[in-house]
Amino acid sequence: MMPALGTHEAGRSPWLVVALILIALALWRSLVAAGIPLSVDEAYYVAWSKTPDLGYWTKPPMIAWAIGAARAACGEAPGCVRMVPVLAFPLSTLLMILLALRLQFSRTGAAVAGLAFATMPLASFYGIAATTDGLLLLFWIGAMLSLRIALDGSRAAWLLAGLCTGLALLSKYSAGIFALSAALALLHPRWRPWWRSPWPWLAAVVAALVFLPNLWWNLSQGMPTLRHTAEISQHAGYAVRPLAMLEFLLSQFGLAGPVLFGGFIAWLAARRWQASADGWFIASLALPFLVVISLQALLSRAHANWAAPAMAAACLAAVHTLSDRRRAWLIASFVVNLALAAVLYHFDVLVRSPLQLEQVVRTDPFWATRNWPGIHDRVRDVLSRPPGANAAPRVASDDRAVLAQLQAALVLPPGAALGWQRKGIPDNHFDQRFPLPARPAWPVLLVTAAGPDAVLAAYPDAVPAGEARSDVIRDRPLAFSLWWLLPAR
């Protein structure tokens, strides 16, 4: 790396400052996270966590395991569920600092790189969202650090790299791209002799063994998770879409922050990384993910966060470049990214209320969560008055979003949220694990957007129970009809 970051300076240690900043960020995010209703995906993962397993319908199991641990530790509230990302990102930041030190950054340079990662828009958004991304990044960066230590000759680090890669695969299948990144890193002349060593291959075996239980689960269940991954990748089919790829690449400026991603591009364009083993390592851990997902965007579609792990290496490259001759830009990156976080977290106070904007989709970053509490309250009220039934009522729906939200918000036990298989085949976790029977033996409150004809065709004795409606976000209201399905007497 360059001398500006490769010299280990004397003087005051930055670690106390780093620790205080990370604690402050975690407290800030935990307060924000506690005040936002769970999204549909988060609620879905909460439902998974109530039935521990080796795999689930649309994702590997790590997120459900982590949320289950969080729920066991502190309860069912959104702030507790979101302790998973709130804690994952500080841990990822510490690993980033250790990786920067291994890459010969100075102590100050390593601290700056870690804090730059911790304040990226990527970290600001996914640091309060209990999704797969926070855990994927944690284990991906752990695998990066282990690989870099292994390349210096540590045999145990090869096994640790395999372990971290396997855990990343249990978080999100796209972590498989790490194998491509590691192979590319090993093409550097300094590290090519490792191809003749058994240790990289043993690391691959360890990763496969860690991932094997989920693969076995998929095989035993008809491959639902892998099939879903293929389906969302194909979307509407394959075609060449250059504008979609351009949109994806531009979205990376938003994911990393405009200054940091610009610094990464400047680092790539300078091409000095080609002459350095550490520079080659950073490029190897950033470019394959970006290239693979860019091709995915070109041929089908790709969301901005699908290449999130590449931002770890990109952050290191950007800090290296900006710390060299453009330190004012590095300072600007912190200002911009923290300002974006403040606007995201406090949009109502800083933007919407002062400008007296109507609460609609375009004026609320968390619009998708706002209408659900009204649905929860209405369903809770109807459930409290089941018609002449002794058994505890259950809920059912043909919409996994409804079931996920109700099971999380009403703290329903496993089996109390039932999937109505209107197509005759399972389409989600509830359909698969807890299908609604044709003749339920307990009172069931059916919550559906289907019309009366569809409900009565399947359940002729269904009793109307009113409607659940919420329009906090006026241009995206939620409305469902409610029906009691009562056991035969």
Image: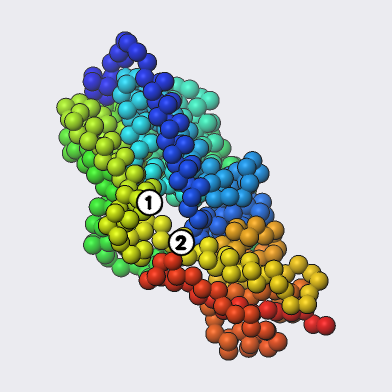
Answer with the quarter of the image where residue 324 lies: top left
Tell me the residue that label 2 is attached to: 370
Quadrant placement of the N terminus: top left
Against 443, residue 285 (above or below) is above
In the rendered image, residue 288, in percent from the top left (x then y), is placed at 34, 45
210 relative position to 293: left or right: right
Q: How many marks?
A: 2
Residue in view at x 41 percent, y 66 percent = 473
> Measuring 17% from the left and 35% from the top, which residue is drawn there?
270
> Viewer-proximal residue, 172 or 408?
408
Q: Mark 2: which amino acid?
A: Arg
Q: Can residue 280 be seen here?
A: no
- Residue lying furthest right: 489
Q: Quadrant of residue 112?
A: top left
Q: Dot 1, crowdedness within 10 Å: few (<14), some or many (≥20)?
A: some
Which residue appears farthest toward the top when viewing the image? Answer: 10
Task: Report which residue position mark 1 lands on.
Answer: 305
Q: Quadrant of residue 362?
A: bottom left
Q: Residue at x 26, y 64 (%)?
A: 241
Residue 76: x %, y % from top left: 61, 50
